Image (cartoon, rainbow, N blue to C red):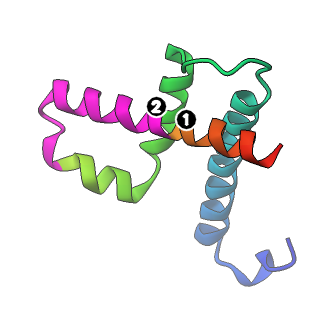
Amino acid sequence: MNSMPVLTKDDQLHVQHFAEQAVGWFELVRSIVNHDQPRQPNMDDRLDIIFSLHHMTDFQDYVHPFLKNDARITAFEDAVAEAIYTAIREHAAGVS
C-alpha cells in the first residue's frame, strides 16, 4: 500500500487486522451467495457470522452488558446471524 510508509508500526498492524476481518466477511458472503438453492443458515454459517460479529466494536459494546446471561446472548447472536444471512441472500437475489 502506498500509504503504509506514513503509518506507525502499530497502525500498520491494525490495517492488516482490519483487512483480514474484511476478507473473512467477503468469504462468508461469497459462500452464502454461491449456493444454488436458497436455504436456511446451518450451524457453520451462524457460527461464522457470530465469530465475525464479535470483532465489531459496536456489537461488542451492545452485548457486553448481558454477557452473563448465556441464553439471551446466544438468542441475540443467533437472531443477528440469521438476519445477516437473510439480508445477504435477499441482496444477492436482487442483484442477480
Residue drawn at x 74%, y 84% as measured from the top left: 6
Of the numbered discs in the image, which one, if any, rests on residue 69? none
State the residue position of label 2. Answer: 82
Q: How crowded is mark 2: few (under 14 residues within 10 Å), some or many (20 or more)?
A: some
Nearer the observer, 58 or 29: 29
Please report the bounds of the magenta region as a residue range: 65-83
Judging by the rendered image, the residue that carries numbered circle 1 is 86
Q: Which amino acid does label 1 sit on?
A: Thr
Q: Position of residue 88 (x, y in %)?
A: 63, 41
Residue 11 visible here: yes
Q: Main secondary structure of the magenta part?
A: helix
Kind of residue at badge 2: Glu
Query: Does the magenta run of residues contain 53?
Result: no
For the residues labelled 2 and 1, say whether their Cβ atoms are less than 8 Å apart: yes
Secondary structure beneath label 2? helix
Quadrant for the C terminus in the image: top right
- As drawn, is 71 to the left or to the right of 59? left
